[in-house]
């Protein structure tokens, strides 16, 4: 029997859950507080277990312009010398799917396509409600929006991220707020053409090759400092 499902949050997790539930024959609505449905950020890596899940949903890695990852190299940052290498070319044979790297926006757009477009099964497309900020939820299967409206469902999926509003409804005990770890990560994108056109950076590009690269600081002994570099769009 089909269920009426509400998913709170239209990020990668929320849209992926909505797509899966839609394909299982359920009536799904996503409530997203922002007024845009686009993903932000840089790139991410998909290992075979994640790739298999996406493939089962009909995800097109070609349409998402994903890059197949065949090797992971560790490179010294001062000399660009390769000191270790992991062969990823056999992951599809061993684990049923390859490793991929993909831009978050392309991944999210393809999931939105699967969720909201007509498909071969004629299942009802997911309804995406933007500018719909959820401020409260109840275990009776209801959510309340900032505008005061109340919506009910047979199942509510909490996919509203780090600062989740629904967490306090699901958990019966107090939860600690996120605390600083002392570690930081900075993510950015660069057009490969810019690297090729710069004589010094072109050397680094050639040293990296068409692989995942972990570039390490060999002089740093007290804290780990490294850069991960890979292509994310064909």
Image (cartoon, rainbow, N blue to C red):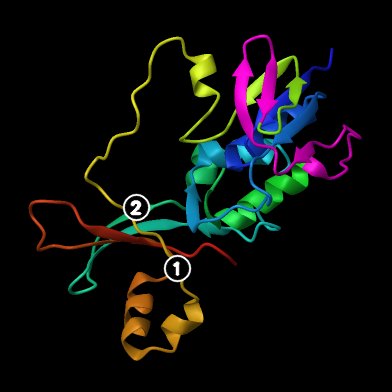
Near-viewer residue (117 or 203): 117
- Residue on which disc 2 sits: 86
Residue 140 placed where, x, y %? 68, 9
Residue 147 placed where, x, y %? 71, 33
Q: Give SS at disc 2.
A: strand
The image quadrant of residue 181 is: top left
Near-viewer residue (163 or 48): 163
Of all residues shown, which one is farthest toward the right?
A: 122
The image quadrant of residue 121 is: top right
Give the CA separation, mark 1 to mark 2: 13 Å
Residue 231 placed where, x, y %? 48, 65
Residue at x 89%, y 39% (from the top left corner): 120
Near-viewer residue (220 or 101): 220
Residue at x 38%, y 88% (from the top left corner): 198
Residue at x 38%, y 15% (from the top left corner): 174
Judge the density around disc 1: few (<14), some (14-19), many (≥20) Cα neighbours within 10 Å: some
Name the mark on residue 210.
1
Q: Is residue 153 above or below residue 54?
A: above
């Amino acid at each position: 029997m089909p269920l009426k499902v509400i998913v709170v949050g239209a990020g990668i997790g929320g849209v992926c859950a909505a797509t899966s539930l839609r394909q299982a024959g359920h009536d799904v609505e996503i409530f997203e507080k922002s007024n845009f449905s686009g993903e932000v950020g840089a790139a991410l890596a998909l290992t075979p277990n994640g790739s298999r899940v996406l493939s089962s949903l009909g995800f097109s890695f070609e349409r998402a312009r994903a890059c197949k990852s065949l090797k992971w190299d560790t490179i010294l940052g001062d000399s660009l010398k390769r000191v270790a290498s992991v062969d990823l070319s056999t992951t599809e044979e061993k684990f049923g799917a390859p490793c991929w790297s993909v831009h978050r926006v392309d991944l999210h757009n393809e999931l939105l396509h699967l969720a909201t477009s007509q498909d071969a099964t004629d299942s009802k497309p997911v309804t995406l409600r933007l500018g719909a900020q959820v401020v409260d939820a109840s275990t009776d299967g209801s959510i309340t929006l900032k505008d005061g409206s109340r919506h009910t469902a047979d199942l509510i999926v909490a996919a509203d991220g780090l600062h989740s509003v629904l967490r306090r409804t699901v958990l019966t005990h107090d939860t600690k707020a996120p605390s600083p770890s002392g570690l930081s990560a900075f993510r950015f994108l660069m057009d490969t053409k810019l690297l090729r056109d710069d004589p010094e950076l072109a050397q680094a590009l050639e040293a990296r090759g068409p692989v995942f690269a972990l570039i390490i600081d060999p002089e740093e002994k007290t804290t780990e400092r490294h850069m991960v570099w890979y292509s994310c769009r064909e």
